Amino acid sequence: MKYFIKIFKESIIVVILSSIFGLISGTLLSSNKEILYTIPILLLILPALNSLIGDISTVLVSRLTTHLYIGTILPKIQKSKRLKEDFYGLLMTLLLSLVVLIFLGYSIAVISGVKLVNPLIIVLIITFTILIIFLMMFILLFIGAIYLFKRGMDPNNFLIPFITSLADFLTPLFIILFIIIFI
């Protein structure tokens, strides 16, 4: 019962924050629908992009937490060989997944007759969005995991739901910003 109460206390704050991020994300999407309609393929790919960055971030949190608990990463903000290996491994996984996602998105768009605007611009928007969010998430998750771990909390209980909600907010935000910048 004690463990249940600990998880509940650690999770209630993040559930409230996740709900707030969800409301902000929905408002962002709703208020910028005209911008998103200019490139319909992005509407097709947006849920998969959210899922991709959320999944990669979840794997990262789990790996960081495991490393902290078994001692392969010290609870200090410093570079380590293990951290670099995780970064490059997840970056390669992200890039390969992104290539497949773009290919599938374009295939579905062509088959379904979705209007395709300049493909190079779309690939740049998607790639910049995912890479910037990945870098931000990596730094945020690393610092957050160490901070929570030092305070005796389980980083998984807070960071996984938080980071998923944050990714759901940041992905459309950066896509909208890059559409404004590039188009």
Image (cartoon, rainbow, N blue to C red):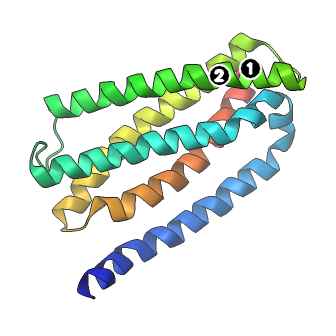
Q: CA distance from mark 2 to mark 1?
A: 6 Å
Q: Residues within 10 Å of mark 2 (few under 14, many from 20)?
A: many
Along the viewing direction, whichever of 60 and 142 lies nearer the viewer: 60
Seen from the viewer's position, the closer of residues 143 and 51 is: 51
In the picture, the quarter occupied by the N terminus is: bottom left
Is label 2 in contact with label 1 (beta carbons under 8 Å)?
A: yes
Q: Up-down: is 167 above or below 88?
A: below
The location of residue 27, given as percent across then percent down, is: 74, 56
Foreground pick, 7 / 17: 7
Instruction: Provide the secondary structure element on which disc 2 rests.
Output: helix
Residue occupied by mark 2: 102
Looking at the image, residue 126 lies above or below residue 76: above
Q: Residue at x 85, y 21 (%)?
A: 111
| Residue 112 seen in the figure | yes
Q: Residue at x 52, y 26 (%)?
A: 97
Image mark for residue 106: 1
- Secondary-structure class at tag 1: helix
